[in-house]
Image (tube, rainbow, N blue to C red):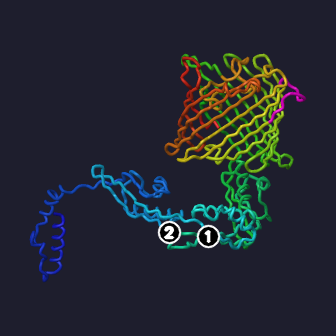
Amino acid sequence: MMLAYYRTGRALAQNKRTDARPAPADSKILGPTFPPFLIILLLLSGCMKQLKITEEIRIKEIEFEGNNSISDKKLKELFLIKKGDPYIERFAREGAKRIVSFYRSKGFFDMRVKKREGEFLKELNEIRMTYHIFEGFRSKIDSIEIEGNTLFSDEKVGKILSINEGDYYDEAVIGTGEYSLSNEYAEKGYTNAEIRVRKTIQNISDPAKRVLLNVEIKEGEKVWVRRIKFKGLKGIRRDVVKREMRINEGDLHRPSRVYESQSRLYRTELFSDVNVQEQKVKEDSVNLSFIFKEEKPRLINFGFGYESPNKGLFLFRWGHLNLFGNLQRLLIDISLRASPEFKHWNDIRLPYREEDIRMTYRESYLLNSGFSLVASPALKRVYTREYSEFDLSLDIVLQRDINLYSRISFLYDFRRATIEEAPSITNRLSTRYFYEGRDNIIVPRKGSRFLSQIEYAGGFLGGDNHFDRVKLDFASYRPLPYRIVLALRAVLILTHSREEPDEISTDVRLEMGGYGTMRGFEEASIGAPDSRGKRSGLDQLLFNLEFRIPIYRNIRATIFTDIGNLWMDYSDISLKNLKFGVGFGLGYTTPIGVVRLDYARAIEDLGADYRGIVYLNFANPF
């Protein structure tokens, strides 16, 4: 019907253009003077009834046959369209091209898509796509030739490239090798070095083709830093910036030194942006420009929060990050924690209340040495139904960065704790080593963190507590398939008491239970009973294991288990009496941290009323 109308319209138009030409045969069906109103009637009646709005055809599934070496999941990732998307023909063709390109990048030079089938499911208005693949043989590297290298030997170049004769050809591996070799040259000052890896396919007619790799190296000249410029500095002195720099005028141009300088400048918290621009002067020299955007050195922060299992939290901070213009810092922190108890709206009681006031002063360049000095006096008061505690302390820390990832510290700690009416004084000296190798300290996906500390308390320092203590705290983060992260933590703390263990005051004992140690157990509920009505100990063994599983965008699920215990004497440590807690939870990643809601349960009988513990926190436990 529509086809007849279309032809009639063309015939009428042709007749209108020339009267000499006879009308085509189709025009005789309706006549040359076909009334326009009949056309409208046809459109409003039978013709329009036969028209249906075409619904989008969607993809039911994308399947593959013949792919023995590459998984379906990997091949589907190459497509611009996924299951459930509208079917678009050009995207389907592009997917086939990407499959061929990916296979050939892996050495399958004879690979081809034999055919593409589409099964249309009329009832669902969906299509199932199937790609039939012929992989062919995968080629190996027959030989490697290296040219132009004088700085590194052939053996050293091959080791950096991580490519060997007999390996399967893989462009991703070769590309990584090129990058690694370029970095090695750059760290020697050859930042203009050019690396090219070219392939030659041998025995083209043979299905099992062999590949010859030719590594072309143009080392160029060493590059030196001629000038370093600082732009954007307003309230911060150039001397402060220069002290954080790890590259200077006249040094070889090493990218790692530039990056370390950037990182150290960011760590001062004085800058919101540190950008580096390079300007080539000659083949053997560059100028570097560090462009800064300063932060305000004064800060005032406050916030309200919740701390599991049932504490309200108020935090206040005032500080200055560049007090005397030489990166001196002064911070004053006030925190209030309380567990409210509502009997009536007019009768709110606080069975637990904790007040903490701390001042921290930091001298970043002590006597122009590589050490920094931190002094931190603090006052803490705790009120509960069972006891009250008043602590006065002073921490003095002398620390030095070893490199960008680790530092060593020497600490002196004075503490005077009064629980009820019994004061106790502790003097301690400690040596601490800390390594931070996580890719992200808020939401780590890989890397590790390590802390080791040795303490000496009492003795010639005086005081009421006399002991030696060793602490090891290690955490590791490993990426697994499907973006799952395995997070592991192990803590070992051993205390050698030079007096009776029971005589060591509770303020320097260890507590266990709660979100940061053993979930599923109440805070300070593991160990030996002490004078406060809590439980504590001197020796700790703790293992935490978490599987952090992505669910959707910033939402993650977590499955975890905690294992550990506390003892009063290290000779009592036994793996037979470890306690267990298990649980699961959900977390949402925000720009400032992770909000987590977890449920945990202890694997032991804690009474008929025990139902596990729910935790709401704004950070990962480790």
Residue 353, quarter of the rendered image: top right
Furthest toward the bottom, the residue is 20
- Which residue is pictured at 61% across the width and 70% down the height? 213
How far from the left and from the top, in percent, is residue 390?
75, 23
Front residue of this view, candidates 156 and 473: 156
Q: Amino acid at mark 2?
A: Pro
**Does the stretch in magenta take in 464?**
yes
Question: Is 602 left, or right, of 475 in this rendering?
Answer: left
Work out whether mark 2 precedes mark 1 in sequence or the reverse, and give the earlier one.
Answer: 2
Image quadrant occupied by the C terminus = top right
- Which residue is pictured at 61% across the width and 64% down the height? 166
- Which residue is pictured at 54% across the width and 62% down the height? 106
**Does the stretch in magenta take in 145?**
no
Q: Amino acid at mark 1?
A: Leu
- Which residue is pictured at 53% across the width and 47% down the height? 482
Residue 171, quarter of the rendered image: bottom right
Q: Which residue is mark 2?
A: 207
Looking at the image, can residue 185 be seen?
A: no
Question: Is 76 left, or right, of 23 in this rendering?
Answer: right
How far from the left and from the top, in percent, is residue 25?
11, 75
Q: Which residue is mark 1?
A: 213
Looking at the picture, does residue 589 appear above or below residue 429? below
Looking at the picture, does residue 270 appear above or below residue 410? below
Front residue of this view, candidates 323 and 602: 602
Circle 1: element type: strand
Looking at the rendering, the stretch of residues picked out in magenta corresponds to 454-465
